[in-house]
Amino acid sequence: MPAYSQDVGAEPSWPVEATRRMNRMYRRQRHFYDGTRRYYLLGRDQLISRLQPDAGSCVLEIGCGTGRNLVLAGRLYPAARFFGIDVSTEMLTSAIAAISRGGLTSRVRVAHGDGTAFDPQRLFGIPRFDHVMISYSLSMIPGWRGVLQAAIAHLKPGGRLHIVDFGRQERLPGVVRALLRRWLAIFDVTPRDDLEQVLSSMADTGGAHLRFERPFRGYAQYAVLTFPSEPRIP
Ligand SMILES: C[S@@+](CC[C@H](N)C(=O)[O-])C[C@H]1O[C@@H](n2cnc3c(N)ncnc32)[C@H](O)[C@@H]1O
C-alpha cells in the first residue's frame, strides 16, 4: 500500500480552496521548510518525546506537513503506527518522500484531508486513535475549534490529544512580541490566544484532564488533554 493512497481531486467534498491556499504557500517553501522551521517551531521535539505510545498504538497527526514529526516519532517508537493528514498536496509530496527515505512506509501513512472534517475510517481504515497530535497547525486553520472537535471525536476512550503551537509571547519584551506577531501574520499565522480557555471547556465537557504549559517565555503553548478510559456517566 503506498504511503499516500488517495487520488487527488477525486472527491467533490475535498477542501479545494484550503488546498489551493496551502499549496500556494508551500509549493516552494516545502523544499527548505524543515531546515528553516527547526529554529522557530519550538517544542515539537518535546511533544514527540512525551507521546510515549504503548506498543500497538495508533497515532494521528493533523496537519502533518512535510512529515517531519511523523518520521521522528516513527523512529523513536518502533512498536506504534503513525498516520498523518494534511490539506496541502504539496506538503504531502514531501511527506511521502521523507517516509519512504526513512524506510517507514509499513508503519507511517499519510493522506489528503481537511482537519475540520475528515473520515479516518475511509482514509486509513481506522476510526479512532490512541493519540492525536497537532503541531503548529491550529494557528493556520481558520476553523481551528472544529479541528479540536474532530480530533477529540476520533480519539479512543483513554486517548490523548497533544498540541504545540505559537503562544501569547506574554513574557517576551513588547517590541519583540509586536515584531513577531507582524512577521507571523505574513505567513497567515494567528496565535490562538484563547486556546487554554477553549481546551479547558472541552476538558470539562468530556471529563478530561488538561495539562497546559507556556514554554519559552510564552513563545509557545503546549497542551495535553487526557480522556477517561470509561465514558463519563451524565
Ligand atoms: C506550519 S505547518 C506545520 C507542519 C507540521 N505539523 C510541523 O510541525 O512541522 C502547518 C500545516 O497545516 C496544514 N494545514 C493548513 N490547513 C489545514 C487544514 N484545514 N487541514 C489540514 N491541514 C491543514 C498546512 O498545509 C501545513 O502543512
Image (tube, rainbow, N blue to C red):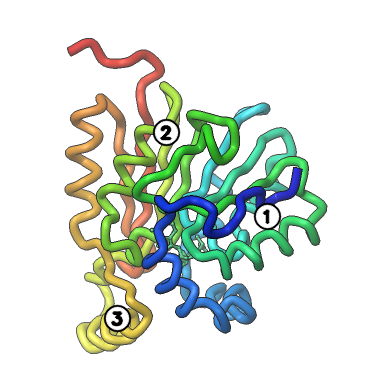
Q: Earlier in the sequence, mark 1 or mark 2?
A: 1
* Mark 3 crowd level (few <14, some 14–19, many ≥20, 10 Å Cα): few
Does label 1 point to a residue whose CB lies under 8 Å from ligand 1?
A: no
Label of residue 71 in the image: 1
In the depicted structure, whether residue 40 falls above or below residue 42: below
* Mark 2 crowd level (few <14, some 14–19, many ≥20, 10 Å Cα): many
Q: Which residue is mark 3?
A: 185
Q: Which residue is mark 2?
A: 154
Judge left or right: residue 64 versus residue 213. right
User: Is residue 100 or residue 44 the one in the foreground?
Assistant: 100
Query: Callout 2: helix, strand or loop?
Result: loop
Identity, as a three-letter code, of the amino acid under mark 3: Ala
Q: Residue at x 36, y 13 (%)?
A: 230
Q: Residue furthest top?
A: 233
Q: CA distance from mark 1 to mark 3?
A: 28 Å
Judge left or right: residue 136 versus residue 122. left
Closer mark to the observer between disc 2 and disc 3: 2
Q: CA distance from mark 1 to mark 2?
A: 22 Å
Q: Residue at x 30, y 38 (%)?
A: 210
User: Is residue 121 or residue 99 the one in the foreground?
Assistant: 121
Image quadrant assignment for residue 201? top left
Tag 2 and tag 3, C-beta contact below 8 Å? no
The location of residue 154, given as percent across then percent down, is 42, 33
Query: Callout 3: helix, strand or loop?
Result: helix
Q: Earlier in the sequence, mark 1 or mark 3?
A: 1
Q: Earlier in the sequence, mark 2 or mark 3?
A: 2
